[in-house]
Image (tube, rainbow, N blue to C red):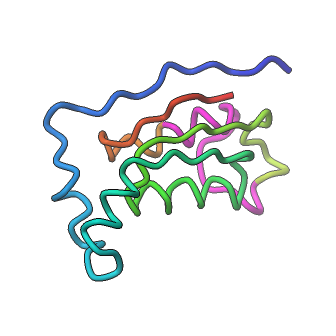
Amino acid sequence: MKPLLVHPAQPGPSFDYDQAFSRNLGWFTEAEQAQLRGKKAAIAGMGGVGGAHLLTLARLGIGAFHIADFDQFDLPNMNRQAGAMHPPWVETRRKSCRPWPGILILSCR
């Protein structure tokens, strides 16, 4: 199967990172939250665990991601997935991060 290449989502100009992740303060200091914003994470596999990790790390304020998976949302995967049937997993997960326009998906494969 060929890798699916997806153009990265670019952060929107009106996205206020500090406001979006202000409720993380208390769990993290302002300095720690600023460090998270500058971090990149690579996640191999967008299945039951990887997809959940992507959303959790995005909600924590990690600024950029490389995500990879060569499978699709199919019927045999239903026991560990929530999402659309048949599209490649990385595309579905990339779209699931759309509510956070400040999150940059650097690459999808």
Of residues 47 and 9, the one nearer the viewer is 9
State left or right for residue 71 relative to residue 62: right
Toward the bottom, the furthest residue is 26
Report if residue 92 lies within the magenta region: yes
Percent position of residue 58, x then y: 44, 54
What range is drawn magenta here?
78-94
Residue at the spot x=56%, y=43% of the render? 93
Toward the front, the furthest residue is 31
Residue at the spot x=37%, y=57% of the render? 35
State left or right for residue 9 relative to residue 22: right
Percent position of residue 52, x then y: 59, 60
**Relative to residue 6, is residue 41 depicted above or below?**
below
Percent position of residue 26, x then y: 27, 82
Report if residue 56 lies within the magenta region: no
Q: How many marks?
A: 0
Of residues 88 and 52, the one nearer the viewer is 52
Residue at the spot x=68%, y=21% of the render? 4
Residue at the spot x=26%, y=62% of the render? 21
State left or right for residue 58 relative to residue 65: left
Q: Quadrant of residue 24?
A: bottom left
Q: Quadrant of residue 107?
A: top right
**Relative to residue 8, is residue 45 depicted above or below?**
below
**Relative to residue 69, is residue 100 depicted above or below?**
below
The quadrant of the picture occupied by the C terminus is top right
The quadrant of the picture occupied by the N terminus is top right
